[in-house]
Amino acid sequence: MNADAQNRNDRLIDTLTNILGKDAVLTEEADRDYFSCDVYAAGERCAAAIKPKDVASLSKAVAATTAAGYAVIGRGGGMSYTRGYTPVREDTVTVDVGAMNKIVEISEDDMYITVEAGVTWLQIYEALKPKGLRLPFFGTFSGAKATVGGGLSQGALFMGTARYGQGCDIVLGLEIVLADGSVVTTGQGGFKNARPFYRTYGPDLTGLFVHDGGAFGIKTKATLKIIRAPKYQDYASFAFKGIEAASRALSDIARAQIAEEAYIFDPESTDKNLASADIVKDIKTLANVVKGQSSWSKGLLDGAKLILAGRSFAKDGMFSLHMVAAGRCAEAVEHDLAAAREIAARHSGEEIPNSIPKAVRATPFASVIAVLGAKGDRWAALNSKVPHSEAMKIISAGDRIFARYKERMDKHGIWTSRLFIAIDSYAFSYEPVLHWNDEWLPVHRRTLPPEELKKYKEPPADPAARALVEEIRGEFTKMFAEHGASSNQIGKTYPYLDSLKPETRKLVDGLKSMLDPKGALNPGVLGFK
């Protein structure tokens, strides 16, 4: 950095310190490295990271940063694996919204909750549970650390997704800081004299800011729908000999709307999920299974079955489909499970012990240990959303890519797994994951608790394997675009802008120019330069 650039940087740091306080402006190299990488890759080292505690100070900080010609990137829990918030230039200030973590309002009468963007899905779950309430979609696997702001920017899904959709489907309104520091509110909360109970009085402005990766603004608050938590739930798992039968069963279960979650693990994922837990975690899960049942005696029986089933049901080469049924009465849940059994049988599925979905629901946000693999390895997921009728087409295309790269993958010690998820009644999600041994990034070292980190030995750097993973990911994102697939966690990985029809792209470019004329907000995300 030359003298002029250093002076410019120092002036901005002084300004941000005056606005936020010294402790909220991080300039140490280790901090900047941490805030410049996600789970997958490191970007350019940012100039500083800031930790605002309220929207007023964030507004001033964003205005000062963009006026100085710097870029600004919002960051939630740091669980991105698509370069969602990694800088593409050094003159960038990263905004950690983690200190904006208050639950603002829970309206039991009007059935909504308003939270700051740094609130985690786990926080909401724990705040609503004693009241007998829940979000419809209620979080991601990483919900102990993943935030609402990050999830709505990137595309959060999983818990409740088979019935209620994704995070974007439960949003009623947002508060956003724009590139010039101005603060706007969408949904009914954006009207005078109004409560934030409704989303679409006029154009759906909320929709502009979900899944935008922070390209249009930095989220500071969100109002979300809530529901009365289903009183009864039960689980089912089925084994299939091949992915075609399993995927057809998953699609039929989704269309029938009989599950809150429905997903398939491939043989590698099934083995991993059965093998990764130790006996201490099993005992904790058992306790939660017992507590999670409406009847204590049923919980004790289910807990005993979970221990007896253990990992004994795993069969070589099986694709396992898992689902959660939930409802207001036991009869409704049993009806849904009976329908699922009929669907599975129609596709030659065999019912197996329901250990996996039961354990997932017993401790839905168990830990953030999954930022590394079971043996300290690295992983990188991709995802595509297609109509049910095109599920096998995209799965087969993915298999062809893996087959083409098999020899090189074997040479560099790269292996794969796949996850398949039902999204409401209308979409099928295909998620291929690449695994390899490589040096860890700062986000791995800081996210894992010290007692967990010491269980692993960090692998040596393997730039050749890393480069091959990047090459294969590029082949997959290209293939997804050729199939007209949608993807969450767009980040700087999927060719969003380049895949749009010209007229649609012109509209999106126009919105970006109006909201962020300098291109200061998360440069590179969605494909914006």
Image (cartoon, rainbow, N blue to C red):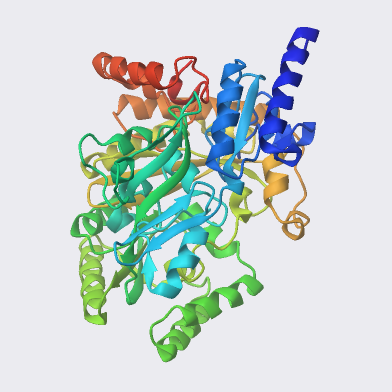
Q: Is residue 71 visible?
A: no
Image quarter where the N terminus lies is top right
User: Would you identify the image quadrant in which residue 511 lies?
Assistant: top left
Q: Is residue 525 left or right of residue 90?
A: left
User: Would you identify the image quadrant in which residue 191 lies?
Assistant: top left
Q: Residue at x 61, y 48 (%)?
A: 99
Q: Is residue 72 left or right of residue 34?
A: left
Residue 231 lies, with reference to residue 415, above or below; the image says below
Residue 291 lies, with reference to residue 244, above or below; the image says below
Asked whether 392 or 295 is in front, the reply is: 295
Locate residue 261, reporting x and y percent: 35, 60
User: Would you identify the image quadrant in which residue 475 lies?
Assistant: top left
Residue 293 lies, with reference to residue 449, above or below; the image says below
Residue 503 lies, with reference to residue 162, above or below; the image says above
Locate residue 39, reporting x and y percent: 61, 40
Q: Residue at x 29, y 18 (%)?
A: 507
Locate residue 216, reporting x and y percent: 43, 28
Locate residue 373, reporting x and y percent: 62, 50
